[in-house]
Image (cartoon, rainbow, N blue to C red):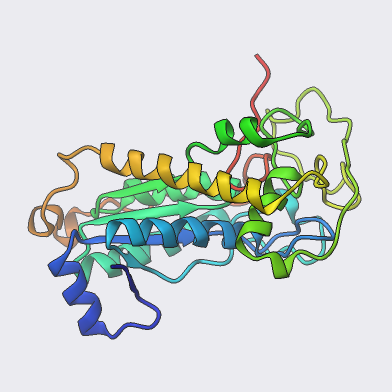
Amino acid sequence: MRLDAATATAPQVVSHLRAGRGIAVLPVGALEQHGPHLPLSTDTLTAEAVAERLADALDALLLPAIGYGATWNMSGYRGTVTLRPETVEALAVDIGTGIEAAGARLLVVVNGDWGNREPLARAAAALALPTLVLNHPGLDEAAERVRESRPAAPGLMHAEEIETSLVLAIAPETVQGAAEPVYPDFPPEFGVVPMRMHGFSPTGVFGDPRPATAEKGAALLDAVVAASLETIAAFPSSIRRSGAEARRSPDRRRRVSPSRRGAPPRPARGPGRRVRRPR
């Protein structure tokens, strides 16, 4: 069974990692606006829900979520709190280093927000501990199966049917009534260059949340968890070596790559989803 690090003792954590598969699962979300009806913690709630199910299936150590992320393109909406990309990267590196010292042999990062993708990828590359970053695999395909509304832009999921369904399934008590659909007129370069989103939707909704249901959300979660477990199983066995082989001396660790200060993340929103770029 999983062990929750937040309520476990230090000896329990070390014993669990040593006795089991040595897997630690870290959910990473954001505190950003999701319209007038969804909580600021939407991306964190989604990442936590996936991480909990993965930890259960893997008998893993579940780490407390990082509830903030690099969400520059939503920072024009009051209430959103964004981190610099280099802060997200440094947090993930420090957490990975600490949990490796406790005996972890694999870190699985469940990312819930698009803006975290690049800094988390850099953190994974910097860590000696084998680290797999999951950006909700399987969600695109599952969304196409359940959705009744059209997306505001190809691949864009933010405070609309898909995200609202997820929150209805995970934490229905946090959903504050209904919200009206918003379909902005995006410029041709949308999805290609970084853009702040508050100029496109006054409410922060992108698409139509009205067809959302908890049943759809449960199906979406099941699909993401199943695809995530497949991805973990396929993670190269040459990387998932023993703790003694995995650890490097401090002078051999790669340094965290510096981020360009002020360089914002790409503009797509949703639970780790992308806007497909025009060809």
Residue occupying image coordinates x 35% and y 45%: 229
Q: Is residue 149 left or right of residue 142?
A: right
175 and 23: which one is in front?
A: 175
Image quarter for residue 182? top right
Residue 163 shows up from this direction: yes
The outermost residue toward the front is 215
Q: Residue furthest left?
A: 244
The quadrant in which the N terminus is found is: bottom left
220 lies left or right of 240: right
Q: Total of numbered circles in the picture?
A: 0
Residue drawn where x is 64% and y is 65% of the image: 171
Residue 89, horizontal then vertical, whole percent: 45, 56
Q: Is residue 276 left or right of 105 when viewed as pictured? A: right
Q: Is residue 103 left or right of residue 219?
A: left
Position above or below: 120 against 39: above
Q: As displayed, is residue 156 above or below residue 120?
A: above
Q: Position of residue 5 (x, y in %)?
A: 35, 76
Q: Residue 47: x percent and y percent?
A: 52, 57
Q: Quadrant of the C terminus?
A: top right
Indicate the position of residue 74 as horizontal and vertical percent values: 74, 52
Camera-nearest residue between 47 and 107: 47
Q: Is residue 260 visible?
A: no
Q: Residue at x 59, y 45 (%)?
A: 114
